[in-house]
Image (cartoon, grey):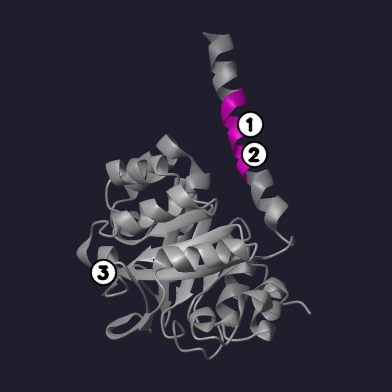
Amino acid sequence: MKEKTLEIDRACFFKAFTEWFVVLQFKGCIMKIIPAIDVINGRCVRLFKGDYNFQKDYLPSPFEVAKKIEQAGFSDLHLIDLEGAKEGRVVNWPVIEQITQNTKLAVEVGGGVRAKDEVARLLALGVQRIMLGSLALQNPEILKDLLVAFGSEKIMVDIGWKDGGVYYHGWQEKADKEFEQVLKELLALGVNRILLTDVDKDGALQGPNFGLYERVGRDFPELLVTASGGISSKSDLRRLKNSGVEAVVVGKAFHEGWLSLSDLQNYER
């Protein structure tokens, strides 16, 4: 019995050490740039400040854009099912499957994922990581179960930040907890990755909320943060790298031509 207890203790220690080492490994390393595709009704779209009433459609199709991103040399893709985020269930399965089955991109998917079977199905399709917003914030026990079942590397919590508050359900609803409290509770559950978006910056092309990322990096160094919202220039990317974020999602600036794929790859020049 004593030997079995020691084995469990060693396993727990090794798991905790591994997750801690992963965090340290990324801090201060090369910041990853991840092009983004948002999808409604099978089409590439972008919203303005998360408002579904301000939707702009883009050509070509999500799959064609993904192939272009892959051919440019990128290894990752950020894909949001905006219909799913609004309806509370994954909607654009055909788009997700087409991209994961016909490219080598490491795809992270979010929008409407509310159940364990959806997470399992997405991972079975080859999705690299699942972004959870409403489920993570409303059902911490289910989130904990998912972290245990699939591992913290496969789960990222999607947080919409606005005026100090936390937003979810397609950024349409506000949580009843303060931002810092939410982060503390997520860490306690075993979360080590978050996608953090200043909602008022999203789609505005006016620069990201640098202070927000710098503060989170300082106060919550255990978290690996992916920044999103407002990026419009190479200088934005260079400054974000200095804030210590692990990765940056670039959407509208890429689709609108403010930043080319070449610019994203060579932002330090």
Instruction: Read off the residue under disc 1.
Output: 14
Instruction: Read off the residue under disc 3.
Output: 41
Q: Is residue 202 left or right of residue 170?
A: right
Location of residue 37 (image quadrant): bottom left
| Secondary structure that dominates the magenta span | helix
Of circles 1 and 3, which is in front? 3
CA gap, disc 1 and disc 2: 6 Å
Q: Is residue 60 left or right of residue 87?
A: right
Q: Position of residue 205 (x, y in %)?
A: 51, 89
Location of residue 92 (image quadrant): bottom left
Q: Is residue 226 left or right of residue 159?
A: right
Residue type at mark 2: give it: Thr
Crowding around mark 2 (Cα neighbors within 10 Å: few <14, some 14 to 19, many 20+) is few
**Stretch in magenta:** 10-19
Secondary structure at badge 1 equals helix
> Which numbered tag is attached to residue 22?
none
- Report the front residue among 156 and 268: 268
Residue at horizontal 61 percent and vertical 43 percent from the top = 19
Instruction: Read off the residue under disc 2.
Output: 18
Give yes or no for residue 18 being in the magenta stretch. yes
**In the image as oriented, which residue stretches furthest toward the left?**
87
- Report the front residue among 147 and 131: 131
Residue type at mark 1: give it: Phe
Q: Earlier in the sequence, mark 1 or mark 3?
A: 1
Q: Position of residue 79 (x, y in %)?
A: 43, 63
Residue at horizontal 68 percent and vertical 68 percent from the top = 244
